[in-house]
Each structure stands twice: as structure tokens, then as C-alpha cells.
Amino acid sequence: MNFLAILPVAWRALMRHKMRSTLTTLGIIIGVGSVIAMVAIGSGARTMIEQQVASLGANTLMVFPGSVSSGGLRGGLGSSTRFTEADAKAIADECPSVAGCTPFVSYYGRAIFGNQNWPTRVGGVYPSYADVRDWAVSSGKFITEADVEKGTKVCVLGQTVVDNLFPDGSDPVGTFIRIRNIPFRVIGVLEPKGQSPFGSDQDDQIIAPFTTVQRRLLNSTYVSFFMCSATTPENIYTAQDEIAALLKQRHKLAPDQDDAFTIRNQADLLKAQTESSGVMQMLLGAIASISLLVGGIGIMNIMLVSVTERTREIGIRMAVGAKARHILMQFLVEAVVLSLGGGLLGVALGIGTTELIAYLLSWPTLVSTTSIVGAFGAAGLVGIFFGFYPATKAANLDPIDALRYE
């Protein structure tokens, strides 16, 4: 008896009890569908995190003042305002692995246009900010060196600000908005960036020349932090070391003295975020895999019942020449057919559930071929593993006792 001959026999045996076979495969269907859906949700979340981190700039370094000790107390990020504009220029000029560096100051206030107003952040930057963040304008232009030198009252709007100040969809370029009762001419609109890894809306901001924000809106001389970019992703750690060494030299920090700054790079952020999402993805997959285990136990239970019900049939087969391996193969094939049939339906259920979740809840999902093949393969292995014991029990029956069984 070959494998192709066993398949129709196994199919006919399963179809004798259609409802029982359907209920048996239900555990496999739910298990496979759950694994695919959970892995798709985890993969989608991981991809979204990678996109969000990339939207900050793949080579970006954030240099914050802080991490100082005073009177036995250790300050955190932003607890010291020792940075100056000259530090940013020194980083850009003296660090070979740094492609660009811009100081950053923030003013939180309300932007007004006509009868519309919107609370937002106004960021004061250098023109190099666009290159550091890899952020282009969708219309108009970005600020220039001349704007920074002259303290020009111009600005570039994020898309969220545009949507709220210009709800009629009109082009804001060339119009004037008021911030702290100071008129700013809109010279450009930034391309949408979306949400940052920290949950904030990157498009909810206005960009203006550094000197304009510092002198006219803040009336101060401090710098909030620096944003720098490495020449290549491979040089990001080299650039970080160069910046640290330069700042220590400029601020005359002793080797045993705490740094008065903290440097964060997107590579470390991406690694931490993806590791976290990877662990969550594995956890979701493991929880969903429990359904496969339950489905396998159901298959073993039903196959044991089938062996008991078909004891006399097994005896007759043995009496007419069937070997133990033939009986073993027959029942094993029946278990595998149940599990693979449930696996196919489970794949359809998993893909459908994933699409439904993405549509109804707007969650990021990503169905991969690997998860489909893996879940379907796991269903087949479950059928073999949990079907082996009932098949072995059937194959080891004594033909004489089996023929006498009523």
C-alpha cells in the first residue's frame, strides 16, 4: 500500500463523521489563524517603529545638556543650559564624521491666522536642520543662512499646523501668521513625517530661523539642544565620540568629571525599540501557539476514539494481509489530513482577521510568507506528533483480539 492509495481511504474514514472531523480541526484552525494574526500585528508594529525612528533621521544624533552633579544631586536631561551657539558651529567645523549640526530652541505658543488659532511648538534652527532630519518641503522653500543672520521673521509650517490654521485647504505660502503678536511670513510647508517613536506628532510644529526664535520669542541666549547627523550610518558612533571629546574640551571637563551633556543616537533607539517589539512579537506568537497545542490534543483524543471504534475493521485489514506499518500509516495520514485541512482554513482565517483588524482598528499589520509557512508547517507537525500515539496503538493491535472485538 503506497501513500497515494492511503489518502482516499483516510478521506473516506474521516467523512463518515463529518461533524466530528470539523470540530476536531477547529482547534487547529483557531491556532493557525491566531499565530498568523498575532505575528502580523507584531511585525506591523515593529515596521512602524522602524519607520518612525527612520523619520527622525537615520544618522541623527541628539546632544542634550544635563547629567551634571551639584551638591550631591545628579541632574537629568535639560538640567543644565551650558550649550551655546558656538558649540554647534564648533561641532560642525571640527568633527570630521559630522555632516551637519544645528542648535535647537523651542517656544511653545499659539499661532494665529485670521479667525483660526492653534497651540504648537516653534522650533528655532539652522538651515542644516532640513539635511540633519532629512526633511524636505512639499511647497515653498526652507529657511536660509541669510534668514538666520538677519533674524528674519519667516517660518515653515508642519502639516498639522497647516490643517488647523488653513482648514479650507488654501496654500499658506506667502501668507502671514502671528506668534506672540509678531507677524511671520510663511515661506514653506514641510512634508508630512507622522508620529515619532515617542508618540508625539512631528508635523505639529513651526520651524523658524534660530536667531529669530531665540531673540524675538524667547529673549534668551541659551540653546536647548543640538541635532547633528553623521556622514554615514556606519560613522554614527565615531561621530558620537568626536562630539563628546570636543564638548569635554570646550567645557573644560576633567577626565574623572561627569559629562555635562548626554548624546543619543538613532541606532541605539532603533535597537532598543526593535528588541522590545521583537520580544512582544514572540510573546504574542507563543500565546497563540497554545491554541495549536490544544488542537493537537483534540486530534489525538478523536483518533484514539476512532481506533477504538474501528478495532474490528483493523483486525479484518490485518487478516487480509495489511502489515502493522500499513495500519500505522493509515491512521497517521488521517491525523495529518485533519491538521493540514485545519491549517489551510486557519491560514485563510488568519489573513482575513489581520485585514479586518487593520481596517477596523487602523492598527499596523504585516502578514509575512514566513509566518504563513511556519504556522502551516506547525499544523502538520502537530498532526504527526499527536497522531503518532493513536496510530501506533492501532498498529500494535493483535489481529485475533481485534477480530473478536464487538
Image (tube, grey):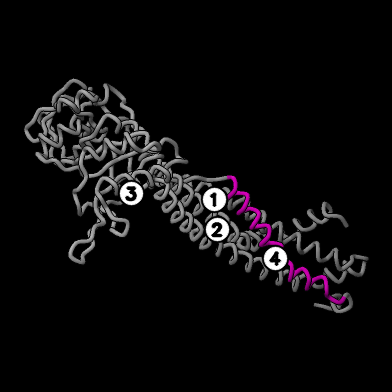
Mark 4 highlights which residue?
A: 385
Look at the image and tell me in which quarter the N terminus lies. bottom right
At label 2, the amino acid type is: Ile
**Callout 4: helix, strand or loop?**
helix
Cβ atoms at labels 1 and 4 below 8 Å apart: no
Find numbered disc 2 in the image and state the secondary structure of the residue it sits on: helix
Q: Is residue 128 magenta?
A: no
Q: Earlier in the sequence, mark 3 or mark 1?
A: 3
Q: Which residue is mark 2?
A: 30
Q: Residue at x 51, y 52 (%)?
A: 39
Q: Earlier in the sequence, mark 2 or mark 4?
A: 2
Residue 25 drawn at (x, y percent): 62, 60
What is the spatial separation of the Cα atoms under label 2 and label 3, in whole angstroms?
A: 47 Å
Q: Residues within 10 Å of mark 3 (few under 14, many from 20)?
A: some
In the rendered structure, does residue 382 fall within the stretch colored magenta?
Answer: yes
How far apart marks 3 and 1 lie (CA) works out to 46 Å
For the point 16% across and 41% down, the residue is: 107
- Do callouts 3 and 4 mark residues in contact (Cβ within 8 Å)? no
- The mark found on residue 213 in the picture is none
Tell which circle, 1 or 2, labels the residue nearer the N-terminal end: 2
| Majority secondary structure in the magenta region | helix
Residue 272 placement (x, y as % from top left): 42, 53
| Extent of the magenta region | 369-398
Label 1 neighbourhood size at 10 Å, few (<14), some (14-19), many (20+)?
Answer: many
